[in-house]
Image: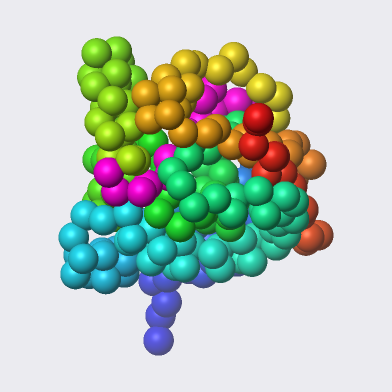
């Protein structure tokens, strides 16, 4: 039986993919990030019916957290969390942390306190199953392009924190900083804490530079990668 050119082309592609994955760091980066984003979209789709039963609720964050916690193992990322005991507060509070990449999601799910939701850019709401799952999880969306809208959202978030005993997670840099250093903080997180009269707790995420760099298209594989999350004591 004669084999078509299309079949031969498919065989060749399937043979080349593993070879390229091993030899090309850039190709490995693209494959790993494509799988990461695709897998999260798929997990969000599975989470939707479970979250929809309760409707939009901060309690749905427990479902999202449990469904995402295994992803770090797929990439061999080991997370060492220090100071988690400082999160043992019963009242509402604001968490602030630095922001490096979409991989921060994995660390967030590692330490996310109960009844805690992040503040996210409004564009996330339109990312298919992920956006809908985030909405059902009670995530607070802000339009960073409209200051008046952002201020009103923060004011409502402050009222919600006190009324519904909610904690809020904020990335005060306002954008991702891929080199692991710190950008100047925007004031929204601290305005929120002042309005709600609640404490602010910082989390420091160590740099990903040893194994991940978006600008260099580098996402290493093989060895176990270690990520440090330091939960600092509450300021007096």
Q: Which is nearer the eye, 178 or 140?
A: 140
Is residue 168 located in the magenta-colored stretch of the structure? yes
Q: Which is nearer the eye, 116 or 48?
A: 116
Residue 166 locus on image (x, y percent):
37, 47
Please state if 62 lies on the left or on the right of 71 as rendered: left
Residue 17 locus on image (x, y percent):
59, 60
Q: Quadrant of residue 125?
A: top left
* Magenta residues (range): 163-178
Confirm whether residue 214 shows in the render: no
Q: Which is nearer the eye, 17 or 140?
A: 140
Residue 180 locus on image (x, y percent):
70, 30
Q: Residue at x 28, y 34 (%)?
A: 159
Q: Which residue is drawn at 40% across and 54% down?
A: 115
* Residue at the extreme bottom of the image, as rendered: 1
Does 231 appear above or below 221?
Answer: above
Please state if 201 lies on the left or on the right of 85 as rendered: left
Does 147 appear above or below 38?
Answer: above
Confirm whether residue 45 shows in the render: yes
Q: Residue at x 48, y 40 (%)?
A: 93
Q: In which quarter of the image is residue 40?
A: bottom left
In the picture, the quarter occupied by the N terminus is: bottom left
């Amino acid at each position: 039986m004669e084999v078509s050119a299309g079949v031969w082309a498919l065989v060749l592609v399937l043979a080349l993919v593993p070879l390229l994955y091993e030899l090309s760091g850039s190709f490995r980066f693209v494959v790993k990030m494509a799988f990461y984003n695709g897998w999260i979209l798929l997990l969000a789709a599975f989470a939707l019916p479970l979250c929809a039963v309760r409707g939009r609720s901060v309690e749905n964050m427990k479902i999202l957290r449990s469904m995402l916690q295994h992803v770090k193992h797929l990439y061999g990322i080991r997370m060492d969390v220090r100071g988690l005991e400082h999160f043992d507060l019963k009242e509402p509070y604001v968490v602030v942390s630095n922001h490096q990449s979409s991989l921060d999601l994995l660390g967030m799910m590692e330490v996310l306190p109960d009844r805690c939701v992040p503040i996210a850019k409004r564009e996330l709401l339109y990312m298919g199953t992920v956006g809908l799952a985030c909405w059902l999880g009670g995530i607070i969306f802000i339009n960073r392009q409209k200051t008046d809208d952002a201020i009103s959202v923060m004011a409502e978030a402050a009222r919600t924190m006190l009324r519904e005993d909610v904690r809020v997670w904020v990335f005060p840099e306002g954008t991702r900083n891929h080199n692991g250093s710190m950008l100047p903080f925007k004031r929204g997180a601290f305005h929120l804490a002042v309005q709600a009269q609640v404490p602010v707790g910082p989390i420091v995420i160590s740099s990903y530079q040893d194994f991940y760099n978006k600008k260099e298209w580098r996402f290493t594989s093989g060895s176990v990668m270690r990520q440090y999350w330091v939960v600092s004591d509450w300021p007096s």
